[in-house]
Amino acid sequence: MSLTATPNGDRVQIAIFGRRNAGKSSVINAVTGQQLAIVSDVKGTTTDPVYKAMEILPIGPCMFIDTPGLDDEGELGEKRVEKAVQVLNRTDIAMLVLDISRLTPEELAQGRGIGEKEQQIQAMIEEKKLPYVIVLNQEDKLSQEEAEKRRQQIMAKNGTVPVCNVSTVRKMGLEKLKDALIMLAPDTDLKLHILGDLVEENDVVVLVVPVDSAAPKGRLIMPQQQVIRDILDNHAVSVVTQVPSLAMTLDMLGDKVKMVITDSQAFGEVSRIVSTQIPLTSFSILFARHKGNLRTLVEGVTALDRLRDGDRVLIAEGCTHRRQCDDIGTVKIPRWLKEYTGKELQIETCSGTGFPTDLSSYALIIHCGGCTLHEKEMKHRIFRAQQCQVPIVNYGIFIAYVKGILKRSVELFPAVWELLE
């Protein structure tokens, strides 16, 4: 991703659901004014969820997710539908698209006025308490009176859910649909900032950013970029340094330093340099709070002391990246696990969207900070681990624990710090 672009995980996620040939891709293209999705008369053109970044004012940066048809058939079709349903785990707003011209009198009269496939996904959307809009597409195939009559029938059966008639051919109803999306959009001002509640204007925050063989060429990694931006948004001052120059930096700044934030991999070295009078935490721990559940992840780390020979441990990352020779997920964490536990463990890894469906066989899950994941997706992964009664921890908390400095690294968060008393 470009350094000037909003991270995909921080965009408002708008997912679109419906049967094959309901016109889902056409609706996305019409709403955005761009050819973001492939349009075809052939059923099943969209075979996997397709993610398209876009900006819609006044919502701001959005991610439109075009999903496979809910009525896809066969064994492969069922897997495609399953992928479509999984999209709900990261959705902020859902759009349920129907071809208004194909609604039968029976469908209009029964239940909620729509077909069985739509009712199934509708129930899942409501179970997750997601805001959504029903889009009756292709109204140009009916008279204006008949199209409005059908809209009123659907509205009468769906309470306060917005129902919009649109025609992507004649560009009708699109502004009303945009207005509905704007009304349903989450208030991003209510979202917990990464460290906005921890700093005040003109506070100085020192960031320790190692530049080694695992660092990407010519840029900072996403969590570092986002923390710097959050510091600036809160009118504080960020000072970026590396481990060898940290002591000199702290001497230069004196008592102006409000806190130090380090890359988790340098926790051990940094903790020996930074005075205990200065709060110390890591980028990963900040993201555990920002996108996950800090308390749950801190509670999960104690499972390290209960691991036995032969236990399965999953090391999961939200992104896919080119592995380096000393990669943290596949090399360093397995090494630290072996050194700390002394056990012969079965270690498995996954990355990107490939998070296992069944977690019950794992004794522990060690997850990255989730900087590229949407907050809902990260929290859903934590929730699934809890459902299976599998302890889960993130990289920063794991590293602080095995280095013996976890209590110090969470002292900024009193409610969590008390767990370690």
Image (cartoon, rainbow, N blue to C red):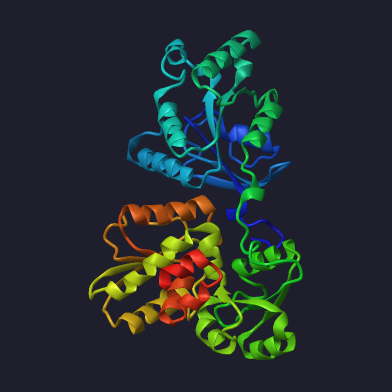
- Decide if residue 296 is in sight here: yes
Image vertical order of residue 196 relative to residue 62, above or below: below
On the rendered structure, is 239 left or right of 82?
right
Image vertical order of residue 82 relative to residue 254, above or below: above
Residue 420: quarter of image: bottom left
Residue 209 rendering spot, x and y as whole percentages: 62, 79
- 125 vs 41, nearest the viewer: 125
x 75%, y 66%: residue: 201
- Decide if residue 369 is in sight here: no
On the rendered structure, is 351 left or right of 74?
right
On the rendered structure, is 187 left or right of 161?
right
Image vertical order of residue 75 relative to residue 329, above or below: above
- 375 vs 401, nearest the viewer: 401
Residue 146: quarter of image: top right
x 60%, y 81%: residue: 210
Residue 310 rendering spot, x and y as whole percentages: 23, 73
Q: How many marks?
A: 0
Residue 389 rendering spot, x and y as whole percentages: 30, 57
x 34%, y 63%: residue: 391
Q: Which quadrant would the C terminus be assigned to in this image? A: bottom left
Residue 269 rendering spot, x and y as whole percentages: 53, 87
Q: Which quadrant would the N terminus be assigned to in this image? A: bottom right
x 50%, y 22%: residue: 158
Image vertical order of residue 10 relative to residue 362, above or below: above
